[in-house]
Image: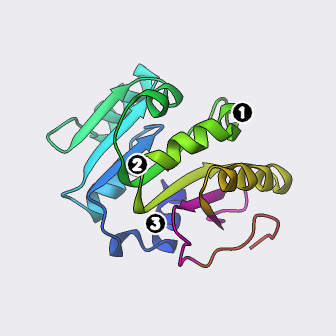
């Protein structure tokens, strides 16, 4: 959750109009709780393919389904491919054994993500990539039509900040250590 606290501060999420959010990778539910805290009226759809993680988020961290929070047990890649809807904020926090899934680099997936982001919205993708892989992801995201910036909340994390229009966020290039 500390990663997302730093990223949300960096992109000034509290100052942005977030009426709807899509969270791919529920984990313990920290991202959902952060969004609920900064935007209590936002409608949140959280997607995770692991019923154990959904149970942990619900039972141990108090993440509940309600009129504004939907929790979907489904593969995130399938969800993005098949489900309609666009969101003010899309957060991607997908890992397989502490690694970024290779499917995250697919231009088709990134284009599908692009389609889920409102014109004024943000796409945030948490990664643990080295410089060359981060640059490759940025290139694929650009080909998918996204304007790309970066945030380094911790040395091991590079969070891609994608937007449809040119982003006003001044973030360092993934090749830098900043």
Instruction: Kindly state the secondary structure of the residue where label 2 is placed.
Output: helix
Numbered disc in front, either 2 or 1: 1
Where's the C terminus, which quadrant? Answer: bottom right
Say which of 54 and 47 sits in front: 47
* Numbered badge on residue 30: 2
Query: Residue 85, located in which quarter of the rendered image?
Result: top left
Which of the marked residues, 3 or 2, is nearer the chain's N terminus?
A: 3
Instruction: Kindly state the secondary structure of the residue where label 3 is placed.
Output: helix
Q: Which residue is the site of mark 3?
A: 8
Q: Which residue is the site of mark 1?
A: 102
Label 3 CA crowd tier, 10 Å (few <14, some 14–19, many 20+): some
Which residue is painted at 66% across and 62% down in the image?
154
Label 2 CA crowd tier, 10 Å (few <14, some 14–19, many 20+): some
Which residue is painted at 35% across and 36% down in the image?
84
* Numbered badge on residue 28: none
Question: Residues in magenta?
Answer: 148-169
Name the spot of residue 29 as percent of width and height, x first.
Answer: 38, 42
Contact check, label 2 and label 1, Cβ < 8 Å: no
Label 1 CA crowd tier, 10 Å (few <14, some 14–19, many 20+): few
Q: Is residue 144 left or right of residue 57?
A: right
Instruction: Kindly state the secondary structure of the residue where label 1 is placed.
Output: helix
Say which of 175 and 142 sits in front: 142
> Gap in Å between the C-alphas at discs 2 and 1?
24 Å
Name the spot of residue 117 as percent of width and height, x first.
Answer: 43, 52
* Magenta-colored stretch includes residue 157: yes
- Residue that protrudes farthest toward the top in the picture: 51
- Asked whether residue 178 appears in the rendered view, the answer is yes
Numbered disc in front, either 3 or 2: 3
Numbered disc in front, either 1 or 3: 1
Q: Is residue 45 left or right of residue 82?
A: left
Query: Residue 14, located in which quarter of the rendered image?
Result: bottom left
Name the spot of residue 132 as percent of width and height, x first.
Answer: 85, 53
């Amino acid at each position: 959750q500390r990663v997302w606290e730093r990223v949300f501060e960096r992109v000034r999420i509290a100052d942005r109009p977030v009426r709807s959010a899509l969270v791919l990778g529920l984990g313990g539910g920290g991202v959902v709780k952060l969004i609920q805290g900064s935007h209590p009226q936002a409608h949140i759809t959280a997607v995770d393919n692991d019923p154990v993680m959904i149970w942990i988020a619900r039972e141990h961290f108090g993440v509940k389904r309600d009129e504004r929070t939907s929790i979907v047990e489904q593969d995130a890649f399938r969800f993005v491919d098949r489900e309609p809807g666009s969101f003010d904020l899309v957060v991607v926090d997908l890992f397989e054994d502490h690694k970024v899934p290779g499917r995250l680099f697919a231009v088709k997936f990134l284009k599908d993500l692009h389609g889920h982001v409102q014109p004024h919205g943000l796409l945030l993708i948490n990664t643990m990539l080295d410089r060359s892989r981060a640059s490759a992801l940025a290139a694929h995201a650009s080909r998918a039509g996204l304007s790309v910036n970066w945030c380094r909340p911790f040395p091991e994390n590079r969070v891609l900040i994608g937007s449809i229009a040119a982003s006003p966020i001044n973030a360092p290039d993934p090749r830098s250590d900043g």
